[in-house]
Structures are given as structure tokens and as C-alpha cells.
Image (cartoon, rainbow, N blue to C red):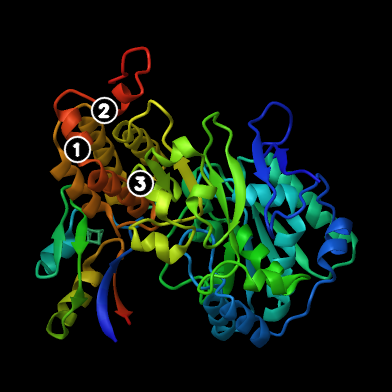
Amino acid sequence: MTARLRVDWPACQGRGLCFEVLPELISLDEWGYPVVEGEVPRELLGLAREAARTCPTLALRVVDAP
Amino acid sequence: MNPVLRVRPSGGPGGPLLDVRSGPFLLRDLVADPSLGRHRHRAGPLARPSLHGLVEDLAGADVRGRGGAGFPFATKLRTAAEAGRRREVVVNVSEGEPASFKDAALALTRPHLVLDGAALCARALGTRRVHVVLPGDRPGVAAALRRAVAERVQDGERLRWRLHTTDPGFVAGQGRAVIELLSGRPNLPVTAWAPEARAGYRGRPTLLSNAETFAHVALLLGAGSASYRTSGTADEPGSRLLTIGGESGRPVVVEATHGTPWRDLLDEPVLDRPVLVGGYHGTWAAPGALRDLTLSRTGMAAAGLTLGAGVVLPLAAGDCPVHRTAAVTAYLAGQSAGRCGPCRNGLPALTDGVRALDEGVDVSARVGELTRTVTGRGACAHPDGTARMVRSMLALFGEELDAHAAGDCTYRHADALPGPRSRR
Ligand code: SF4
Ligand code: SF4
């Protein structure tokens, strides 16, 4: 099992607080919505969880990916 | 007996017509009598399959979902069976894609074949309840299924049929949007954290598929199933339904066994034109490309084409693929539910880009980038499908884009249609 970041798009309001917490894995598109790609490496798992907690609409989740 | 049956999905007088051509299995011996009595006479009594037996049968015949994704139906059924005890069955007849009429054709000509398939799955899954999702914008289809369900209830079938009606619009028929509708929430897509076969309606395992898929299940278990199993190709037995867009604007639904050459399915002039295969979320086929291909999922995939829900839209004579792509993109942008940022912002931007291309501004790099930006970033696959369609235009019609950039359009010239080209 590896961890991935997933966005609940209807809930995401943009503005990118998650990006500020985790610029290593998150970038923003031209409208300010997060672009999350690839797996979350083990050493960034803590920060990824923090980014998810920081999201004001709880739109960001760390999920298990097969 | 009638080789072509003309039906009216909208119901009532005056609505657009649909031609349904007789076919080998699903559309065999079409008559204007979709009654339960006649259906039972043809198809025999409903089987009572074991779960294991049904999974084996479906896997053996490689029955796949006919809604677009082509997911193996046996896997879906097994997943639902293993995920929990209170299982749900959902027949989706809503066909979100407005150019698709195959499920409408089934509902209007063989509704009981569809309902049999759902009943068989319900029996195998040990549930008494079946949901039927009716298209809100096709009252004739909805009425046909209501009638058919009423007949079955009167006949004493011990299933609880629950009917639901979608809102109009492209994404209302999407799987998650349908589950929202069943749950009494707005009929819009939401983020799926697990496949609905594991956690769908009320978090229960939910076997959801479109009408055609369930009709194939019924064929597989009904009278005459032996010839169905040996039809098609070794890899892909059986048949599939196609909706072919017509020059007159009247689409025709046909059934063809897998392996049928496209030459036998499309008229000669159409084969030499660009064809949008797989509907508005599909991919463009180059002029002549279908000439040497057959109706097969794998064969089409090898040529970079997806069959999707089986919609085939030949470009009309005198139309231009770039112009047409711009029109379809604009339409699709208008159909976005507007709730996911990348889709809400990205599809209008994509529309502007493709319009600019049509008008001769070379922004293909920007358009290509936008297709990547929107893909995979929504609650449903609407942005992905839109991007796929646009990308296939970029990949195929580079020369035409050059012509447009030079202030020209080969397609409009080639057909020498009278009147000026509408540039705006
Ligand atoms: S913090 Fe949450 S709402 Fe804000 S951009 Fe990130 S995921 Fe979206
Ligand atoms: S991806 Fe687009 S169409 Fe799908 S739910 Fe989100 S906004 Fe609506």
C-alpha cells in the first residue's frame, strides 16, 4: 500500500492553503486549484496529513492507493 | 416483422424520431409489442442463477459494461457480492450522453429483456429490490419502462421495483450522480472514495450498470443463449448496440456482433469522412480509418479509438472537424455541473482555445496544455472525456489547423457548399 493525496473537487475552494504546507507535492494551476501528483513518499507522509488537516473544507485526503 | 422500427423517445406526438434496426440478439424480430406476455413467450421463464454460476457465465462470455468504461461485469458482480450482505441493483436507463439512444431503443422495444437482466442479478445477489433510473428528458422512454414494471408487478413478480427520474443534463446520468439521486440528494456527481460495487447507495454494495449491460445478462441466461455465446469473436463474444448519427439528424440504433467490419455498418460516403467515435467524450477517427477496422474493443483501442457507449457521429458533409470540435467543446463546457474548480474554469478556457483554433489563431500548444490540466481533476470524468475529444482533434487534424491558420478551411472548400463559412 502506498499513500496518495486526493482532492474532493466539489468541496475544494482553491486558494491553496494545502500548497503552502506541502509545496513539495502540491502546485497550483492557473486558477489556484491544487495539482497533486504521484505517491506520497514516506518522509512526507506527516506533512501530507498536516496539509489535509489544514484544508478549511476538508477537501484534501491522504488515501491508500493499491 | 419489421426490419426498422421507428420510435419516439420523447413520447407524445411531434418529438424527434429514432430508427431501430433489427439485429441478431437484443434487437431480433422487432415488433411494436413490447409486452411481458410476448417477451416470456420468446425468452422463456426467468432463470434462477446462483451467484457463483452467474459470475462464471459472465466471466466466460467476457460481458463488459456498455456504459463507456467497458469494465468486466463479472468483477463488478463479484465485488458487490463480497462487499457486504445488503446489496442493491440499479439499472441506469438515463444515458447522460445526449447523442446516445441505445438504451432508449431497448426501453422502447425490449424493456423486459433489460428488466430480466436486473431481476436475474437481484436473484443471484439475494436482494428483492431493484432501482430503475429513468431519463428525465425522454418521457417516452420513462413511460415505456413504467408500463413494463407495472406489468411485472401485476404478473406477481416478487421484486420491489423503485423508479427514479434524473434531471436533464449530461452529468445527471453519471454513476455517482445517480446514487445521489437515489439517496434523495441533488442529482449531481460527487467524489467517489470507493467503487459503488463496494460502497454505493447508502454505503451498500451496489451493482449499477446501464440498460444494455443488463439486457446482455438476460441474453446470456435466456433461451438461445448458445448462439449468443458463440457469436462475435473468440475474445469478444456477443454483440453491442451502436447509435449512429444520421445525415438527416435522425439517429439509428443498430446491433452488431463483435468483429463486424465498419464497412458493413457505415455508408460509403461516411467512411471517407472524419467520424467522432464514442460520442462527445470519444475520439475522432481520420477519414477512411474505419475502413479496415472491425467492431472490437481491442482492435479499436489499438487504433487509438474508444467505443465508449457506442455512439458514432460521422461529420456532416460540408462541416469541418475543427469547427465541429469547437461546437462540441462549447456544448460540453455548458454541461459542466460547475462545481469542481478545474472543470468550471478549464472547460470554458478550452472552449475559447478551440474556437480560436477554428478562427485561425495558432494556440494549439495552449489547448494541449489545457487538456492536460483538466484531466483527472473533477468529481466525474466529464473534463477527462472533453479533453480526450479535443486532444484527438489536435492529434489528427494538424494539417487542417495549419490551413485554418492560413485563413483557409479544406473541408468547407472540398464540398463546395454555397454560402459563406460561418466564422463566428
Ligand atoms: S486547502 Fe483545501 S480547499 Fe484549499 S486548495 Fe487545498 S484542497 Fe482546495
Ligand atoms: S468534474 Fe465537472 S461535470 Fe463533473 S462534477 Fe465536477 S464540475 Fe461537474
Label 1 packing within 10 angstroms: few (<14), some (14-19), many (20+): few
- Residue placed under numbered mark 3 in the picture: B284
Examine the image and state in which quarter residue A40 appears. Answer: bottom left
- Residue placed under numbered mark 1 in the picture: B399
- Dot 1 or dot 2, earlier in sequence: 1
* In-image side of B250 versus B7 (left or right): left
- Residues at badges 1 and 2 in contact (C-beta under 8 Å)? yes
Q: CA distance from mark 1 to mark 2?
A: 9 Å
Camera sees residue B339: no
Q: Are marks 2 and 3 on the same chain?
A: yes
Q: Amino acid at mark 2?
A: Thr
Give coordinates of residue A5: x percent, y percent. Answer: 25, 71
Find residue B410 and name its label.
2
Q: Nearer the viewer, mark 2 or mark 3?
A: 2
Give coordinates of residue B423: x percent, y percent. Answer: 28, 20
Camera sees residue B169: yes
In which quadrant is the N terminus of chain A drawn?
Answer: bottom left
Q: Are marks 1 and 2 on the same chain?
A: yes
Determine the residue positioned at 33% across, 31% down. B320
Give coordinates of residue B5: x percent, y percent. Answer: 73, 41
Looking at the rendered structure, the secondary structure element under dot 3 is strand
* In-image side of B279 versus B65 (left or right): left
